[in-house]
Image (tube, rainbow, N blue to C red):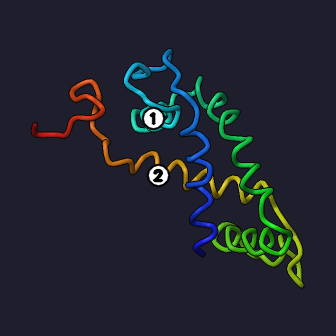
Amino acid sequence: MARFERLPFDVISQIQKSPPCLELEGGEDAKTLWDNYCLDQNRGPKPLLESAWTATFAPHLMKVVDEPDTSEATLLTFYCCWGQCGAPIEVVGDPPVGIYPQALTAAIMDEVIKLALDRPWRVDVQDLGWGEKEGG
């Protein structure tokens, strides 16, 4: 579903508007907070930072979940619950009228994490700068 696939990018675009945290590892090379997050995820998330990242992403996740009207939110809930629970119809109802924000935010955040891990510069910034490529 194209609409659902766009939601993680809406969250990321909001995070990219935030300046980097210079105190985090690699912060001096980061251009945005998204850079900090990607580096943290690629190096292996640190348990002490997880609650900070959760708090950072939470308002942006809720914003994209709150934007759709009720019928679209119900369809998005059904879509994200389809593969995550045994009977999505139990979540959204019959006829579908239910909205499950926790399922939506969890599914969107799963996609955000995948995008952070799949970022093209997945090289070790200790060896190469953020803008350098392997082999030269």
Three-letter code, disc 2 = Leu
Q: Is residue 1 left or right of residue 117?
A: right
Mark 1 or mark 2, which has the lower sequence index? 1
Looking at the rendered image, the quarter that the N terminus falls into is bottom right
Q: In the rendering, which numbered label is found on residue 115?
A: 2
Under tag 1, what secondary structure? helix
> Callout 1: few (<14), some (14-19), or many (20+) C-alpha neighbours within 10 Å?
many
Looking at the rendered image, the quarter that the C terminus falls into is top left
Q: Is residue 17 left or right of residue 85?
A: left
Q: What residue is pinned by disc 1?
A: 35
Indicate the position of residue 41 as horizontal and vertical percent values.
46, 37
Give the residue at x 89% y 84%: 95
Q: In the rendering, which numbered label is found on residue 132?
A: none
Marks 1 and 2, how far apart at CA: 12 Å
Of badges 1 and 2, the one in the foreground is 1
Find residue 8 and report its image quarter. bottom right
Indicate the position of residue 73 as horizontal and vertical percent values.
79, 68
Give the residue at x 40% y 19%: 28
Q: Is residue 76 left or right of residue 122?
A: right
> Callout 2: few (<14), some (14-19), or many (20+) C-alpha neighbours within 10 Å?
some
Indicate the position of residue 119 as horizontal and vertical percent values.
38, 47
Three-letter code, disc 1 = Asp
Q: Residue furthest bottom?
A: 95
Q: Residue furthest top?
A: 23
Q: Is residue 132 left or right of residue 84?
A: left
Q: Is residue 115 above or below residue 135?
A: below
Find residue 53 and report its image quarter. top right
Q: Residue furthest left?
A: 136
Of residues 65 and 53, the one drawn nearer to the viewer in this rendering: 65
Q: Is residue 48 above or below residue 63?
A: above
Give the residue at x 86% y 70%: 70
Under tag 2, what secondary structure? helix
